Image (cartoon, rainbow, N blue to C red):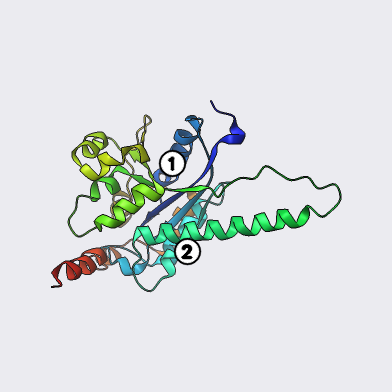
Amino acid sequence: MEDSDNRIEVVLLACGSFNPITNMHLRLFELGRDCLNDTGKYKVVKGIFSPVGDAYKKKGLISASHRVTMAQLATESSDWVGVDDWESSQNEWQETVKVLRYHRQKLNQSYSTNNLDEVASLSKPGRKRKREAGVPQLKLLCGTDILESFAVPNLWKPEDILEILIDYGMVCITRPGTQARKFIYESDILWSHKENIHLVEEWITDDISATKIRRALRRQQSVRYLVPDGVLAYIEKHKLYTTESEDQNSGVILAPFQRYTKESNRP
C-alpha cells in the first residue's frame, strides 16, 4: 500500500430519490470507501447524499423536505457522511452532471479559502507549513441500476455521461443478479473509460430497496431494521408512504424524458 500521506483524497457523492433512505443506501458509502481505500491510492474523506428535487416527477416521490430530513436523521451517527439540500431545493430538475459541477465548485472554493488561511498563519510565530494537499477528487457513488440506466433512450445526454466518466469517475456497488461487467463490455462509451469505473461487489448481500420498503409501509408491515430507527420514527410520526402518496406523479412523464424528448424533436 502506498504512503497514506500521498493518497488522493476523494469525496463520494450519491444522487437519488432516497424515498425513503434505507440501511442499504448507507452501506453504499461504507462499501465505496472500503474499496477505494483498499487500493492504497485513494483516501475517502467525505460522503454526501444529494436527494433529488420534487421536479424530477418520479411516481410515488414524496416531498423533498421529508426526504432530506430523513437522510439527515439517517446520517446523524456518521462522522463522515452528510446531506446536501442544494439539488432538492432547486425549482427545476437538475441533471446529475450539474450536481457534480456544483459540488466540485464548492470543494474548489472551500479548499481555496483553507489555503489562504494557512498562508496567512505563516506570519505567526511558531507556525509551520502543512503539507499542501490538492482539492479532493469528486466521484459519483451509485448502484448498478444507475450504470445500466445509461442505455435508456432520452434518460441521459451522451455528453453528460462522458463528462461524468472523464471528469469525475464512478464507484458502482453491484447488486445480486446484476451483470455490471458485461454491461460495461457491451457499451462502447463505458468500455472506453472503464478505468474510471470502480466496481464494488457486495459479498454480504441484502436486497433492500426503497420500493419494497414503501410497499411494506402501505401494507402496514414492519420495516424495522431495514431503515434507521430515526427514519422509521419520522415516517410513523408524519404518516408517510400511503396508497395516496404512491399515486403521486402517476401518469406524469419523468423530467429527463420531458426535457430530452423535446430537444431531440427540435429541427
Side of 263 where 93 appears, left or right: right
Q: Residue 108, image x and y in percent?
A: 54, 57
Q: Which residue is mark 2?
A: 85
Give the CA separation, mark 2 to mark 1.
20 Å
Q: Residue 134, image x and y in percent?
A: 57, 47
Relative depth, front residue between 252 and 195: 195
Whichever of labels 2 and 1 marks the residue nearer the N terminus, that label is: 1
Q: Can you name the residue that lies furthest to the top here?
A: 1
Seen in the picture, residue 142 relative to 179 is either above or below; the reply is below
Q: Quadrant of residue 32?
A: top left
Residue 208: which numbered mark, if any? none
Side of 88 where 37 appears, left or right: right
Q: Can you name the residue that lies furthest to the right here?
A: 125
Mark 1: which amino acid? Arg
Relative depth, front residue between 120 and 35: 120
Q: Quadrant of residue 266?
A: bottom left
**Residue at position x 47%, y 30% from top?**
39
Q: Which residue is mark 1?
A: 27
Mark 2: which amino acid? Asp
Side of 265 where 228 appears, left or right: right
Q: Nearer the viewer, mark 2 or mark 1?
A: 2
